[in-house]
Image (cartoon, rainbow, N blue to C red):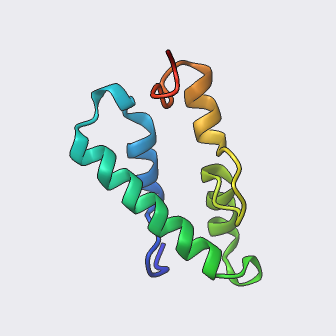
Amino acid sequence: MSEAGRQSFTDKAGAALKPDSQKTTTEHIGDTLKGKTDSAASTVEPNSQKSTGQRAGDTLSGNQNENSESLVDKAKNAVGLGNTSNKP
């Protein structure tokens, strides 16, 4: 992918597949910053100007110009690898 400010699908997959409990503080911060930058870049570019691959990637990652949980996050939460900070 060549769009400025966007994460590659490989980077997204790597961050999603590693359990949050195994990430360092630096990795958590980096994931958060990269995710927010990617989301902002997704929002700025109209869907009509995105490639089919980019629209598909945005659908999987939840970058659809709205605040919805991504399919990847839903899958991680279903198997217990998602965000555990909200658990008692």
Q: Residue at x 51, y 29 (%)?
A: 82
On screen, 20 above or below 49? above
**Which residue is at the front of the view, 53 or 63?**
63
Total number of numbered labels? 0
Residue 58 in the image: state x and y as whole percent. 64, 60
Horizontally, is 74 left or right of 5 in the view? right
| Furthest residue in direction front, as rendered | 88
Horizontally, is 71 left or right of 30 in the view? right
**Which residue is at the front of the view, 52 or 74?**
74
On screen, 29 above or below 79? below
Residue 44 in the image: state x and y as whole percent. 62, 81
Residue 41 in the image: state x and y as whole percent. 54, 75
Horizontally, is 56 left or right of 22 in the view? right
Q: Residue at x 55, y 65 (%)?
A: 39
Q: Residue at x 38, y 60 (%)?
A: 33
| Furthest residue in direction top, as rendered | 88
Q: Residue at x 48, y 63 (%)?
A: 36
Quadrant of residue 69 within the rendered picture: top right
Residue 9 in the image: state x and y as whole percent. 48, 57
